[in-house]
Image (tube, helix red, strand yellow):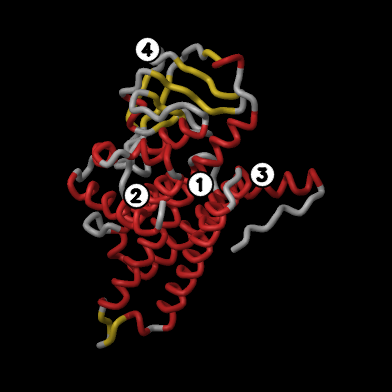
C-alpha cells in the first residue's frame, strides 16, 4: 500500500472498531480485511497494530496463518495456535479445523473435539480450547517443513506487531498518569524514580518496534521469531514498569491497564514465548556453530 492508502486503511480499522464495539471481527468483515490480506502484507501489519493499540481481539490470526499456508482465508476454517490446543473464537463455530504442528498441517474433524471457552489470564480475549480425544487426518500426507515454517513466521510477526503496539499503549497510560498524578504539590513525572521507570519502558518499546520494523522489511521465519521474542520480552518489561508507575491504580478494574497486561501475557505464549524462542535460537546457534544474522535495526 502507498502511505496515504495505508493511513486510510488504518483509519477505517479504528472506525470499524468504534462501530462494532466488542466485535472486531464484524468490523474487519465490513472493510474487506481478507481481500486486503491477500493483496498486501501491510494490511496485516495495520490490523494487528490497531488490535494492540486499542486492546481488541479477533480471529484475524486464523486468516494470516491460512494465507501463509496457501489456503484462502475464510470465516469457516479455524487454526489451532501452537504450542497449545487453543484458538480464537472462530474455533467454536468453524466447520473445518486445522493444526500447524511438528508433524505438519493436520485436519481435525469438527464434530469430534470438545470445545470450551478459556477464562484464564485473558478472559476477554475470546480464546477457545480444544479438548477430548479425536482422530486427526494428515492433509496430503503431511505438509513439508518449509510451508509450516512460513506459516509460523507469519503468525509470529503478526503477534509481535500486536505486542509492540500494546507496549506503546501501556507506556502511554503510565505516562499520562505520571503527568497528571499530583504528589507533594507536583506531578509524579518530576520524580527521578518515576522518570527512570518511564525511560526504561521507552527503551523496551523502541526495541520492540525496531525489531518488528526490521522483520517486516526482511520477512522470514527467523526474523519473525526474533521479532516475536524481542516484542514479548519488551512487553513484559513495559508492563512491569508501567504497573510501578500506576501503583494501586493499575490494579483497579476501572483502569484499562490490566486489560493490556492480561492480553500481552497471553500473546507472549502464542507460537512460542520470548523465553522459548530465545532458547531455541541460541541452541541452534550453538549446535550449528554459526552466528545468527543480525536484524538491521
Question: Which circle's residue, 2 or 1, is located before the other in the chain?
Answer: 2
Mark 3 and mark 2: Cα distance apart in space: 28 Å
* Residue that badge 3 annotates: 280
* Above or below, 290 relative to 82: below
Regarding mark 2 in the picture, which secondary structure is present there?
A: helix
Q: CA distance from mark 4 to mark 1?
A: 31 Å
Q: Residues within 10 Å of mark 1 (few under 14, many from 20)?
A: many
Q: Position of residue 17 (x, y in %)?
A: 24, 48
User: Depth-wise, is mark 2 or mark 4 nearer the camera?
Assistant: 2
Dots 2 and 1: beta carbons under 8 Å? no
Q: Which one is earlier in the sequence, the residue at label 1 or at label 3?
A: 1
Helix, strand or loop at mark 1: helix
Q: Tell me if I can see residue 212 in this picture.
A: yes
Residue 259 visible in the shown view: no
Label whose residue precedes the other's in the sequence (4 or 1): 4
> In the image, what residue occupies the spot 41% across and 51% down?
1
Q: CA distance from mark 2 to mark 4?
A: 31 Å
**Numbered badge on residue 111:** 4
User: Which numbered marker is on residue 68?
Assistant: none
Query: Which residue was labeled with disc 2?
Result: 51
Q: Are marks 4 and 3 in contact (CB under 8 Å)?
A: no
Q: Residue furthest left?
A: 19
Return the residue at label 1: 157
Instruction: Say which of 251 and 58 sits in front.
Output: 58
Q: Earlier in the sequence, mark 2 or mark 4?
A: 2
- In the rendered image, residue 278, in percent from the top left (x then y), is placed at 63, 50
Q: Residue at x 51, y 44 (%)?
A: 156
Disc 3 is placed on an element classified as: helix
> Residue 109, how many percent across, how many down?
43, 13
Indicate which label's residue lies in the foreground, 4 or 1: 1
CA neighbours of label 3 inside 10 A, class few (<14), some (14 to 19), many (20+): some
Amino acid at each position: 500500500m502507498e502511505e496515504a492508502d495505508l493511513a486510510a486503511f488504518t483509519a477505517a480499522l479504528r472506525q470499524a472498531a468504534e462501530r462494532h464495539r466488542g466485535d472486531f471481527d464484524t468490523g474487519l468483515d465490513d472493510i474487506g480485511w481478507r481481500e486486503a490480506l491477500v493483496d498486501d502484507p501491510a494490511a496485516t501489519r495495520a490490523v494487528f497494530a490497531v488490535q494492540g493499540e486499542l486492546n481488541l481481539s479477533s480471529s484475524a490470526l486464523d486468516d494470516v496463518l491460512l494465507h501463509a499456508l496457501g489456503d484462502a482465508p475464510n470465516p469457516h476454517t479455524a487454526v489451532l495456535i501452537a504450542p497449545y490446543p487453543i484458538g480464537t473464537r472462530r474455533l467454536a463455530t468453524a466447520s473445518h479445523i486445522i493444526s500447524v504442528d511438528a508433524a505438519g498441517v493436520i485436519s481435525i474433524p469438527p464434530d469430534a473435539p470438545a470445545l470450551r471457552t478459556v477464562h484464564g489470564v485473558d478472559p476477554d480475549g475470546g480464546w477457545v480450547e480444544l479438548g477430548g480425544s479425536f482422530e486427526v487426518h494428515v492433509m496430503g500426507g503431511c505438509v513439508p517443513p518449509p510451508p509450516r515454517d512460513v506459516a509460523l513466521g507469519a503468525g509470529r510477526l503478526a503477534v509481535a506487531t500486536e505486542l509492540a503496539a500494546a507496549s506503546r499503549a501501556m507506556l502511554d497510560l503510565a505516562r499520562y498518569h505520571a503527568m497528571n498524578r499530583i504528589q507533594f504539590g507536583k506531578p509524579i513525572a518530576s520524580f527521578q524514580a518515576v522518570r527512570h521507570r518511564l525511560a526504561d519502558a521507552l527503551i523496551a518499546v523502541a526495541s520492540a518496534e525496531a525489531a518488528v520494523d526490521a522483520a517486516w522489511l526482511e520477512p522470514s521465519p527467523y526474523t519473525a521469531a526474533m521479532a516475536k521474542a524481542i516484542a514479548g520480552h519488551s512487553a513484559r518489561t513495559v508492563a512491569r514498569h508501567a504497573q510501578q508507575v500506576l501503583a494501586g491504580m493499575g490494579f483497579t478494574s476501572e483502569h484499562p491497564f490490566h486489560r493490556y497486561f492480561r492480553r500481552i501475557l497471553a500473546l507472549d505464549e502464542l507460537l512460542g514465548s520470548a523465553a522459548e524462542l530465545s532458547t531455541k535460537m541460541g541452541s541452534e546457534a550453538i549446535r550449528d556453530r554459526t552466528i545468527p544474522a543480525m536484524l538491521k535495526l
